[in-house]
Image: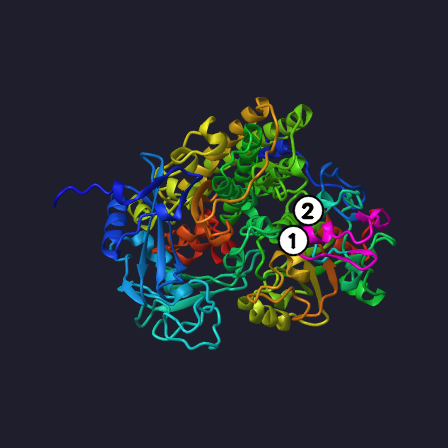
Amino acid sequence: MPEVTDTEQLRQLANGQAVALADVPYLPLPEFRAVIERRIEAGGQLSALFGVANEESEGLQLYVVVGDASTATLSVATTNVEENYPALTPDIPQAHWFERELAEQWGVVPEGHPWLKPIRFHPSYRAGKDAWGRAVGDTILPCVQPPGTDYFKVRGDEIHEVAVGPVHAGVIEPGHFRFQCHGEHVFTLEIELGYQHRGIERRLIGGPDQRTIHYMETLAGDTSIGHATAYCQAIEALAGVQPPLRAQALRGIALELERLANHTGDLGALAGDVGYLPTLSYCGRLRGDFLNTTAAICGSRFGRGLVRSACVKFDVDESRAKDMAGRVEPALRDVEGAANLLWNSSSVMARFEDTGRVSREWAHELGLVGPAARACGVEVDVRHDFPSGIYRFAQIPMSFVDSGDAFARAFVRWQEIQRSSQFVLEQLRSLPGGAIGTEVGPLQPNALAVSLIEGWRGEICHVAITDNEGKFAHYKVVDPSFHNWIGLAMSLRDQQISDFPLCNKSFNLSYCGHDL
Amino acid sequence: MFKAIKERLSQGYRTIDFPKSLPVLPDRFRGLPTIDSSKCPDGCKVCAEACPTDAITINGDLKLDLGRCLFCTDCQEACPEGAIAYSTEHRLAVSNRDDLVINGKSGLQLAAAIDEKSRRIFGRSLQLRQVSAGGCNACEADINVLATVVFDLGRFGIHIVASPRHADGLIVTGPVSQNMKLALEKTYAATPAPKFVIAVGACAISGGPFAGHDEQNNGCDSIVPVDMYIPGCPPHPLSILDGILRLLGRSEAK
């Protein structure tokens, strides 16, 4: 086969850069898919694949964003599809969930998709076009399978099905889980979501307005800083401004505190799920200590109100920085003590090791991101691969383990806790001087901006497309959970059903971030 | 074993003394807003226009609906006269939806305790079931922390239980997405009477940032009867704990 270079076929961007829509290359569908396939085969990551209604031609315009870590560039391209088109998924498994989303939102049918079902259970965005032939006005109920589809079923005399949710036993979000079991043995798990769908993406069109930033902070409440930063970075790209360095450092501190709080909470919850209560108790308190450190900056434990376009709203003077460091240091010591209890307890390790294993190959093929991917030895981390903001100046070493089991997902978190707290302490010691904000002008019209942030669950991708007036014609949000739910499903294969809580917690994915 | 005991000693005693005393809240904490309409120039609407959730109405008199408020301070920032300011007051739970609309003239009418007969039944043992119905998981997170050693909900005889069949009431969060409506109705029906419903957070009270979307129901009180409203986005864990204790007539914080 002749060597084909596709760099000229794709428009390459840095993270947090905008490009005129006219400069986004249009490729006919066969070339579009061939280029994506080559990129993914070469180790690339599918960050976004989404549709925008094409007003001129009745068709659907597809946009793709593929990341290439080796060159720290994000490639974008567009194509047009009609009602049906040959699915990308058989050749590009990373596209599987994106194409289900396309089918549900726009009523197109990616033909040959191996498992074409809705992911959120809402009516099509284009009235009269439904991928499953449902009529306008048909009641759509969550997890009620549309015509021609069903749950994945294993048949046999002694096979039974276990259904869990949407209302679970704990204080957690709703979702529905179906296990195909033989006794305790799980053959498959299928996950059905959509209960948290509240229609955010559609309401972002026409923005930015007073509500936009608040949508960002509530896409996934435990990732308020991550999503707000991704959004602001997209706005800054479109407005052609950079926040002052001091603001970037404070955003970095807040993002790492968010990671610290959640990773610490997860270590505790993992301990709880194997019945090891000391670490559960300690980490429950320590998670709060990190949240309260964020509240010391801005008054909100979740960092609400801190990150805004081209600025942060709260400054940290020397005495406040000292107070914050004085919270992080002892918290880190106590997390270390709590975490080391886990690695030193054979009863804990016996449950963690070899439970819920996901191979490196699967993790890459399915496009897993964040700690879940790094626990399989896949080296992906936006802070490292596509650095933006303060991460261009202060690098955080990437943590990874390669065993792919619940232990790996716990241990990667512990490594990241150490790295993140060192980063926070260093930044607090040497905050850059200057202002914490600058003015934002109007947004570039007819442009597209891509913004990636490494949230605590992994890659957050926002893509903003503006219209003639610099308002959002489309705004795409890809939460890390969007990539990772399938990882949880795969981790349960050939496990015991009693391993589910442990596996689930080891991924700790967002329902609302997925459902939007 | 020795390591575990050593670590236990090192981690120390961490439960707060609430409600006997109040832990120090962050100086930038945003609690109950104070309003001074006398500072409002005639016809000025900048605060109402800045509000992302239409929580502010001005009809000769500035009124702020805490049930819609995200405590984001966009209004405070927009107001050149300083007519709105956020205090660090964390007590926010009320019994009636209308009590959440404040005008700064009278204080917030905090929730009343249940009657003496109910107190005898629930006062020292209250089992609650949480239903997450379409929010952002921040309210859920700050309800969850009540079970940690810091707040130790269990010392009040209050527990979050795994089934509505075991519950005396529900804590609802989220605007009630269309996809969760039926599940909430069924959960409520499965809870034995007499039962309470506590709506926690702007979403469960008014739809919060998602108010007006077709995909949700602007909060839970059109679907289940609500006995207590705890505003915030999300409310601080102390606001939630204060609310639950207040319901039981056990709030001692002054």
Picture coordinates of residue B223 (x, y %)? 65, 71
Q: Please tell me whether residue B3 is drawn above or below residue B225 in the rendered image.
A: above
Q: Which residue is mark 1?
A: B52
Amino acid type, residue under disc 2 in the picture: Asp
Helix or strand or loop: what does disc 2 sit on? Answer: helix
Residue interval drawn in magenta: B34-63
Residue B96 visible in rendering: no
Do the residues under discs 1 and 2 have CB atoms within 8 angstroms? yes
Amino acid type, residue under disc 1 in the picture: Pro
Residue B19, label in figure: none
Label 1: chain letter = B
Q: Is residue A157 left or right of residue B13?
A: left
Does the magenta portion include B54?
yes
In 3D space, how far apart are the residues under numbered discs 1 and 2 (Cα atoms)? 8 Å
Helix or strand or loop: what does disc 1 sit on? Answer: loop
Crowd band around label 2 with a 10 angstrom C-alpha radius: few (<14), some (14–19), many (20+): some
Q: Which residue is mark 2?
A: B74
Q: Is residue B201 left or right of residue A4?
A: right
What is the tally of numbered marks visible in this picture? 2
